[in-house]
Image: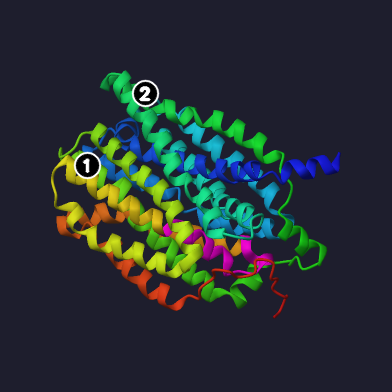
Amino acid sequence: MEAARERRTNNRREILAASMVGTIIEWYGIFIFSSGAIYIASAFYPTVSRAESLLLTLLTFALGFVTRPVGAFVFGHFGDRMGRKNVLLITLLLSGISTGLTGVVPGYASIGIWAVVLLVILRLILGFGLGGEWGGAMLLTLENFRERRGFWSSFVQSTVGIGLIIGTAIFLLLEFVLPSKAMYAYGWRIPFLLAFAILAIGFLIRYRLAETPIFEAAKAEKKILGLPAGQLFRHHWHEVLAGTLLAGSSGNFFYFAISLLPAVFEVRGIISVTTGLIAVTVFAIMDIVFVFIGGILSDRHGRRILLFSANLIALVILYPSIYYYNPYAFTAFLAVFGIAHGLSYSPLGALISEVFPANVRYSGNSFSYQFGNSFIGGPAPYASDALGLISYPLYPVFTLVFILVAFVTIARIRESRGSDLGVLGEAGS
C-alpha cells in the first residue's frame, strides 16, 4: 500500500498539477477582481464619482496584500517545521473559499457599508492564505526536480498567464453574452463562484501527494528548526532583503501593466472594457510563452542576467506606454510588458528559493516574495493612480523607482544556478 502511494505521489504530472493548481486560483482571483474592477466599484462604492469609486476599488484590491506577509510568516514557519504538503492544503482552502465567497457578498444597495466590510474581510482572509501558497508551490516543484530547476519552476510561474487567461476569457464571454445592465447587476459575480470548482479539483490533487524528498531528508537528519524565522533573519537577512526587492519590482511593473493601465484608459474613454480584456489576454499569452523561455535560458546563462534583461525592457517602455492613446498601441505595449514579465518570473522564483537552506527555505522564499508583492507590487495600482491624479506624467514614477532598485539588487545578489538544494542551515551557525 505504502509503495503504491509513493509511486503515485512521485508522478511528475501530479507533482506539477499539485504545484500549479493553488497558484492558478491565486492569480485567477486577482485577475477577475482586476478585470471586474469597474463592476465591483459600482456595486460597492456607488455613492462617489466613477473615478473615486475606481480608486476605492483599487485600494480594496491592495488591502488583500496587507495580510500576505503574515500568512508567509505563519505558513512559512509550519512549512519548515511540519512539511510542505499539509500547509499547501490549508492555503488552498483559504484561497479558494474566500475567492468564491466574494461572488456571494451583497452589494452596497442591499446592506450598505457592511457590504464593504465583508468584501474587505474576504480580501484579508484571501491574502493570509495566499501568503503561504506561492512559496510552498514553488518548493513542491523545485524540491522534487533537482535538475533544470529554472525550467521546472516555469510551470508554477506560468500560472500567472493561465489564471489571467481563464479569468479574462470568462469575463470576455460574459461581456458578449450578457447586456451591460446584467453585468453590473450579477454577471461579475459568476467568475468568483467558479473558484469553488477549481478548489474541489485542486484539493483532490494535493491530497494524494507525499512530502518532498528534501524535507523528508531534513527531518531524518533531525535538522528541523524550532523557530525557522529566527535563523532566517539572523543569518540570511541579506537574501530576504534582496528577494523582497526583486519580487516587489517584478510585481510592481506587472500590476502597472495589467491593472492600472487598463483601468486608467477605460475611465478616460480611450479603450472599452472589452479592448482592455483582450489586451490583458495578449499580455497573458506572451507571459506564458516567455516564462518558459526565461526558465530555459536561466538554466543556461544564470538567473541574474535574465532578471536584468527583463527589467531593462520594462524600463524602456514604461513612459511610452501612457502616451500612445489608441487601442492598438495599448495592446502592443501590454504584449511587450508580458514578454518582460515572463522572462523575469521563472528566474525570480528559482533564485529566491535557491538562495536559502532547506530548513528555512519555505520561510525565506515566502516572506521575500509576499513582503515584496505586498508593499511594493500590490500597492502599485493605487499608488500610481493617486500620483496620476496629481499629474498625468507621474503615473509611472512609483514603478520606475523600483525598477531602478532592482538593477542595484541584481548586481549584488549571488548567482544561484546549480546550487545544492539539500544544504541545511545549522541552528546558531
The reply, left or right, for residue 165 in relation to residue 352 is left
Q: Quadrant of the N terminus?
A: top right
Q: Is residue 211 above or below residue 246?
A: above
- Kindly state the secondary structure of the residue where label 2 is placed: helix
Residue with the most extreme front position: 300
Whether residue 410 is visible: yes
Residue 98: x, y in percent?
53, 37
- Kindly state the secondary structure of the residue where label 1 is placed: helix
The residue positioned 26% from the left and 38% from the top of the image is 276
Q: In the rendered image, which residue does mark 1 sit on? A: 51
Which is more toward the observer, 229 or 273?
Answer: 273
Residue 45: x, y in percent?
31, 36
The reply, left or right, for residue 402 in relation to residue 100 is left
Q: Amino acid at mark 2?
A: Gly
Residue 83: x, y in percent?
71, 54
Q: In the rendered image, which residue does mark 2 sit on? A: 187
- The disc label shown at residue 33, or none: none
Residue 112: x, y in percent?
38, 31
Q: Amino acid at mark 1?
A: Ala
Q: Which residues are magenta?
A: 344-362
The residue positioned 50% from the left and 36% from the top of the image is 99
Is tag 2's residue or tag 1's residue first in the polypeptide sequence? 1
